[in-house]
Amino acid sequence: MTMRKKLAPLLGVTLALTACGGSGDSVDADVMFAQMMIPHHEQAIELADIALDPTVGAGPKVLELAAQIKAAQDPEVDVMTSMLEAWGEPTFLDEGMDHSSMMSGMISVDDMAELETLRGADFDTAWMKAMIAHHEGAIDMANDVIGDGDDEATTDLARKIIDGQSAEIERMKALLGK
């Protein structure tokens, strides 16, 4: 991969941060974190819903993880939405641009479609591998806002995300025998 291709997502995030007009106690990094973490969490919830679909035949450990992930991330989406509304910021990024490629750990449309074709143990393995990568991306985003953001509530949420998702990663790695 060329340096230009490696830097393109970073440039996109930087440009988006620059264009994001924070207000009140928020700063651009806090706003961008919430705006990007909402769709990131929504995809994790979608992955959880796929696992919870009885036709997939996910094993009991994956079902338990999926329910736990959904229970943790649904309310976090509500919190981030409320934060953005309180700051007078949109709860979404520019609709004319696909930002998912800029978000670390996001699962591609093709990979999501393939995951939905798997069943049983094959599904469990692929789902946990995808969710580990997805969680690692969320942790990267959370670490970034801890370093760059100014809003205490955002920083607290980021730490909660890091703690919760790190524990889930360790559990999935143990289940995968890693």
Image (cartoon, rainbow, N blue to C red):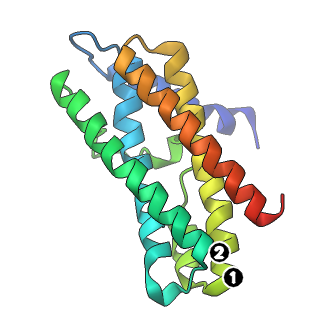
Where 58 sits versus 112, above or below? below
What residue is shown at x 36% (from left), y 14% (from top)?
151
Where 63 sits versus 7, above or below? below
Can the viewer see residue 53 in this picture?
Answer: yes
Count of picture labels: 2
Q: Amino acid at mark 1?
A: Ala
Residue 25, numbered label: none
Quarter holding residue 62: bottom right
Q: Amino acid at mark 2?
A: Asp
Where 160 sits versus 156, above or below? below
What residue is shown at x 54% (from left), y 61% (from top)?
108
Quarter holding residue 154: top left
Number of other residues with Cα within 10 Å of mark 2, as a class: few under 14, some 14 to 19, many 20 or more: many
Q: Position of residue 2 (x, y in %)?
A: 75, 38
Where 61 sits versus 145, above or below? below
Query: Mark 1 — residue?
Result: 121
Q: Position of residue 97 (x, y in %)?
A: 36, 45
Distance Cα–Cα, label 1 vs label 2: 5 Å
Residue 124, numbered label: 2
Query: Of residues 66 and 43, which is closer to you in this image?
Result: 66
Q: Residue furthest right?
A: 178
Q: Position of residue 17 (x, y in %)?
A: 40, 22
Can the viewer see residue 44 in this picture?
Answer: no
Number of other residues with Cα within 10 Å of mark 1, as a class: few under 14, some 14 to 19, many 20 or more: some
Give the secondary structure at mark 2: helix
What residue is shown at x 22% (from left), y 13% (from top)?
23
Where the N terminus falls, by quadrant? top right
What residue is shown at x 60% (from left), y 33% (from top)?
140
Q: Mark 1 near mark 2, Cβ–Cβ under 8 Å?
A: yes
Where the C terminus falls, by quadrant? bottom right
